[in-house]
Image (cartoon, rainbow, N blue to C red):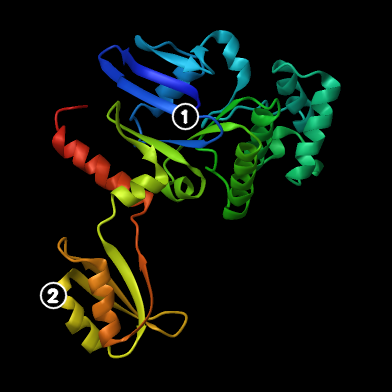
Amino acid sequence: MEDYILKAENIVKTYTRHRALDDVSIAVPRGRVYGLLGPNGAGKTTLIRIINHITAPDSGQVIFDGHTLTADDVASIGYLPEERGLYKKMKVGEQAIFFARLKGLGKADATRALKEWFERLEISSWWDKKVEELSKGMAQKVQFIVTVLHRPKLLIFDEPFSGFDPINAAVLKREILKLRDEGATVIFSTHNMASVEELCDEITLINKSRNILSGSVRDLRRRYSDNSFEFSYLGSEQALTEALRPMVRELETQGIDRDGHLSLALKLNDSSDLRAVVARANETADLRTFRQVLPTMDDIFIRTVEQFNISNPDQK
């Protein structure tokens, strides 16, 4: 039986005439990275604020670690919002200690843990700098450390890679996965679908205030598969394409791959059997490899949102 650290059940939240969340439910398994996805204004930030006990739902409930969420549970949650906030005139080290002490750490323990993290992320030289001297990406590194320092059970990152160059984004991704492997659970809110594929075990997609898709990244990519494959072979391109054309609905030659083999992209007819297609290819050419091409999370995001919007044209 799956162990869930957080469940949000049938959450409804309305602001004046706008319904920000409409019967939204999510279940976050313990020890996983859980993606919270959706276009701008979909309701993601409202749900995160409810989980953080910043605002309350009009109806529905949040279950945290087996009980109804209370204000005391916020100490077990680390939250890195999209809109960061550091005091520009304070020194980096002093400010980090200040935030760590707000989360219950003693000064000596906070200083020791912070020094370890600063060394781990190779930013020890920033300790005595003023925050106003830091770039946006540098400041984000400091806030990431402050967010995770007290080892909360649940971490919530809202667009954590905005402002990072690829190298520093990779560093942060590595640290997020390491935290997961050490037992933390992560909710990761983003528009970056490439990061979703790299980091997330499961996702929920919210659009127009409703949950329109949930599941594991692996299962969703297989569910949305459209029978696309790539063949790598040696032989006659014309002979192979003519042999396979009756069995496929799309076929595209892709030149020579990095191993020096010819490459062919194809989509099978719904009635075609993969084994029969492979057998036909082997009869016609020297087939070296074949692999299924799964849709990206970006493809799934766009397709699902577009289908929902077409089916619900009047929903704001």
Identify the secondary structure beneath mark 2.
helix
The reply, left or right, for residue 20 in relation to residue 146 is left
- Residue type, label 1: Glu
Does residue 307 show up? yes
Q: Name the mark nearer the viewer: 1 or 2.
A: 1
Q: Position of residue 174 (x, y in %)?
A: 62, 47
Mark linked to residue 2: 1
Residue at 23 percent of width and 72 percent of height: 276
Q: Position of residue 176 (x, y in %)?
A: 60, 40
Residue at 44 percent of width and 85 percent of height: 260
Does residue 123 show up? no
Q: Position of residue 114 (x, y in %)?
A: 78, 32
The reply, left or right, for residue 69 in relation to residue 298 is right
Which quadrant holds residue 287? bottom left
Q: Is residue 25 above or below residue 58?
A: below
Taking depth in this image into account, of 121 and 265 the one nearest to the observer is 265
The reply, left or right, for residue 101 in relation to residue 180 is right
Give the Cα distance between marks 1 and 2: 45 Å
Residue at 68 percent of width and 40 percent of height: 134
